[in-house]
Structure formats: C-alpha cells, structure tokens
Image (cartoon, grey):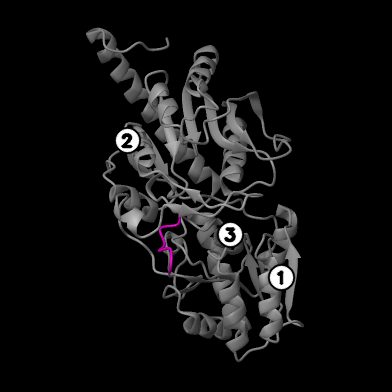
C-alpha cells in the first residue's frame, strides 16, 4: 500500500505529532508499505534523516485557513495527489478546510485528530482566566469567555484573534472525513460534543518501543522527580511541580528536561522556594538522553493543567520502569492505572500531588513494584505492533468503503474519482 502523509508542519525539533509521523512511517515501511510526505510549513532544518519517505513535496498554506497568501493551496494538493495516486491519504494538523473538502473525492482519506485545535479556539479546552477545564462545544460562548484570544506567534508581540466562522468551516470539513482517529477516548468525546459521528471516529492509543534494558537492574532509583515537557507556557505545570516539591516532607532532586520562554520564571520560582540546590534544569534532550533520565528517576511528574490528549511522555516513563504521578486530566487515565503503575491525582490539587510524590520517594520498593507493572502494561497494551496492526485494519476498511462509495457515485454520475 502507498500511503501519503499530509502534515501541517515539518522540520525543526520533533514535537509529538512529528514523532508520531516519523515512528509510524518507520513501522509501515518495515512492513513493506511505501510512505510519501506532503508538508505545509517548514519549522526548521529537515527531520527526514532515517525517515523512509519515497517522495517529499511542500504545499504551503495547508497548516492554516485559506488566505490570500496561498490562494492555490487546495489546487496544489489536488495536483500532487492526482500525480502520485496514493492508495490512501493520512493527514495531520491540516486546517485548510477547502483542501480537506477537495481530497475526499480523490482518494481514500483518514485523519488523525491529535488535539483540540479544530474544536477549541483556545486549543487547550481550558478557561482563559482560570485553571478550570472547559467542556463546552465550539460556539458563541467561546467569544464571550475570551477563548478567541491566543498567545502571539514566536517573535511577535500582538495576540492572535481566532475567527469562529472560520473554525466552523474547518469543523464542517472534518465531519465529512469518513475515517478519523484519536489517541484517546477523551479526545473522541470532545469531538462528539461538537456533533461528530461516533461511527467515524476510532480510538487508537499511541505506542512506544520498549528500551532494550533490563529494568530490574535500574533499581533502586535515585531520589529524584523528573519533568519532561515544553516550558513555552504554563499548561505542562512545571511551576506546580516546584511548589509541590517545596511542600513535600521528603527531600529529593527535581530534574526538568525541556526548554522555552518560561524557563527564567521557573528558575526565579525555584530560587524563591529555596530549591536552588535541588532543581536541575537540563534544557532540551534527544531521545536517547531522555531515556537515561527516565531510567534514573524515581518518579515522572505530570502536573498538566490542561486536558492532555494523551500524554506520551508518561507512556515513555512506564516503558523505562518509572512510575508516574499525574493530574487526572484528558486522556491520562486511559494509560495510567491508579495505584498500580502510578497515581492519578484530582485535577489541579497541588496538595495531593505533593502527598503522592512523598509516598513514592519514601518507598523504593513501591517505585520498583509500580515501575515494573508499568513496563508490563506498555508491552501488553501499547506496543508498536499492536498500533500498526490496528492502523492498517482501519486503512483497509477506509479503502474498501471508499471503493464502494466510488462505484455508487460513478454509477450515478455524481463524482469524478482518480482511477
């Protein structure tokens, strides 16, 4: 099968969506499938080293709504699809509603809904002036709550103002896609609240490869708590971890792996809390280096202050035998078993978060027990093989349904299709 990946963004340090595309491409190529890439916005230097794409092409403008700067984006994408004639198109973070509507009739199409961007003007499903999570569907309520205001783009000072009418057009285009995939039931439920068809959305959890280590040899672990995530905003909750650490009875190190504009503020907070000698800021780290941090830490902290669509770093920690303490938000509870592979803490409850950190740091045997249980759960439920099997089943189903629709359309003379 030839699969055309259509990505809104590509290049630069790999984020969660990039990593999914990279790892999935490798899985599919290893099983004999041919993978192609069309991308829209280039974020930085190429990431295609060791990614087995057979063809690559850029179509600017697909990562955003239609605008005057890219009037031919939909035409350009259609031209590539007609020339390359893939067996299936698999899109990620495409916000050009005209392009999405155009490709549905050309080839079988599946899309991955990685987040809430299409159904939340603020994209976090969280209220603007508080930590409370928002359960409301996309609508006029988003305007009077201020959710149409987003932070400025990198290098700019003015906030972005999101357009509700444009967002609704994207939602309409996505609703017409026959096969949509989410990584968690939590994300699926959010789209169902916005009128999407339950039959068209399939939950397919993310995956991680098990590191080639003997996990029992990594215990006992250092008395340390690890945080891995971006520091570009407050949603990942690094400040929550610092405040919790300041109130814990146990004394432990805090390793913060990640970078972003909030780093100076976090360094100042660590100083105010008297944690200078215990907090270690490491900046961004590559995959192998991050695995080293996981295998040393006693706990991974995930004090996320938004509805995490999945929370892949938690799964990576479990694969390395590291238990997780996390706020119960979004899709986290779908892979974190409370009391078995870590602890789920009521959302935004910093006091209880500190209590669970204390409990694990003080009990090396509990860390080992939960860590090994976490490793087993990843092996059984979140393996690459399990994911690729389910994904290919969906692709084959999508192709079969598209063929049946095409035959009916051709018989009635309604739709032109690519042979």
As drawn, is 103 to the left or to the right of 239? Answer: left
Question: Crowding near pointer 3: few (<14 within 10 Å), some, many (20+)?
Answer: many
Quadrant of residue 29 within the rendered picture: top right
Residue 126 highlighted magenta (yes or no):
yes
**Sequence-first tag of 3 and 1:** 1
Element assignment for label 2: helix
Measured in 3D between alpha carbons, the distance from the residue under mark 1 to the one under mark 2, in whole angstroms, is: 47 Å
User: Mark 1 = which residue?
Assistant: 296
Which region shows up in magenta? 123-129
Q: Residues within 10 Å of mark 2 (few under 14, many from 20)?
A: some
Mark 1 vs mark 2: in front: 2
Judge whether 115 appears above or below 11 on screen.
below
Secondary structure beneath label 3: helix
* Callout 3 touching callout 1 (CB < 8 Å): no
Q: In the image shown, does 140 or 303 lie closer to the viewer?
A: 140
Residue extending farthest front: 158
Q: Position of residue 216 (x, y in %)?
A: 67, 69
Check disc 1 and report its element: helix, strand or loop.
Answer: helix
Residue 85: % across, % down: 50, 15
Return the residue found at the far bottom: 249
In the displayed structure, 13 sits above or below 299; it is above
The quarter of the displayed image where residue 294 is located: bottom right
340, 134: nearer the viewer = 134
Label 1 environment density (alpha carbons within 10 Å; few <14, some 14–19, many ≥20): many
Q: Nearer the viewer, mark 3 or mark 2?
A: 2
Asked if one can make out residue 340 in the rendered structure from this viewpoint, the answer is yes
Quadrant containing the C terminus is top left
Q: Residue at x 67, y 61 (%)?
A: 261
What residue did someone put label 2 on? 172
Please name whichever residue, 255 or 287, is drawn nearer the observer in this view of the structure: 255
| Circle number at residue 313 | 3
């Amino acid at each position: 099968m030839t699969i055309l990946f259509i990505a809104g963004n590509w290049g630069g340090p790999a984020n969660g969506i990039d990593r999914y595309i990279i790892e999935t491409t490798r899985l599919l190529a290893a099983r004999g499938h041919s993978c192609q890439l069309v991308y829209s916005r280039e974020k930085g230097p190429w990431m295609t080293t060791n990614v087995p794409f057979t063809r690559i092409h850029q179509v600017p403008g697909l990562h955003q709504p239609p605008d005057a700067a890219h009037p031919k984006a939909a035409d350009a994408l259609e031209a590539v699809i007609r020339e390359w004639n893939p067996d299936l198109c698999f899109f990620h973070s495409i916000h050009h509603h005209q392009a999405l509507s155009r490709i549905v009739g050309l080839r079988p199409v599946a899309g991955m809904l990685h987040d809430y961007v299409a159904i939340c003007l603020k994209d976090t499903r969280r209220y603007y002036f508080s930590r409370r999570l928002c359960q409301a569907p996309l609508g006029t309520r988003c305007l009077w709550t201020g959710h149409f205001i987003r932070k400025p783009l990198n290098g700019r000072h003015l906030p972005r103002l999101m357009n509700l009418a444009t967002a609704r057009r994207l939602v309409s285009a996505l609703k017409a896609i026959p096969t949509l995939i989410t990584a968690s039931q939590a994300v699926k439920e959010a789209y169902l609240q916005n009128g999407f068809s339950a039959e068209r959305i399939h939950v397919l959890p993310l995956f991680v490869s098990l590191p080639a280590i003997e996990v029992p040899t990594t215990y006992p672990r250092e008395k340390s708590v690890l945080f891995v995530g971006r520091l570009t905003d407050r949603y990942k909750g690094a400040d929550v971890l610092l405040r919790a650490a300041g109130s814990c009875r146990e004394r432990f190190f805090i390793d913060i792996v990640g970078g972003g504009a909030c780093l100076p503020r976090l360094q100042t907070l660590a100083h105010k809390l008297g944690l200078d000698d215990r907090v270690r800021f490491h900046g961004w780290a590559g995959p192998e280096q991050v695995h080293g941090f996981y295998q040393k830490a006693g706990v991974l902290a995930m004090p996320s202050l938004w509805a995490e669509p999945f929370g892949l770093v938690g799964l990576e920690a479990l694969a390395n035998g590291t238990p997780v303490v996390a706020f119960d938000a979004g899709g986290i509870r779908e892979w974190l078993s409370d009391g078995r592979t870590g602890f789920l803490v009521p959302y935004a409850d910093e006091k209880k978060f500190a209590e669970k950190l204390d409990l694990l740091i003080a009990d090396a045997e509990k860390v080992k027990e939960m860590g090994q249980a976490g490793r087993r759960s990843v092996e059984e439920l979140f393996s690459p093989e399990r994911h690729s099997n389910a994904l290919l089943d969906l692709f084959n189903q999508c192709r079969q349904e598209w063929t049946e629709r095409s035959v009916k359309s051709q018989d009635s003379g309604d739709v032109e299709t690519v042979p």
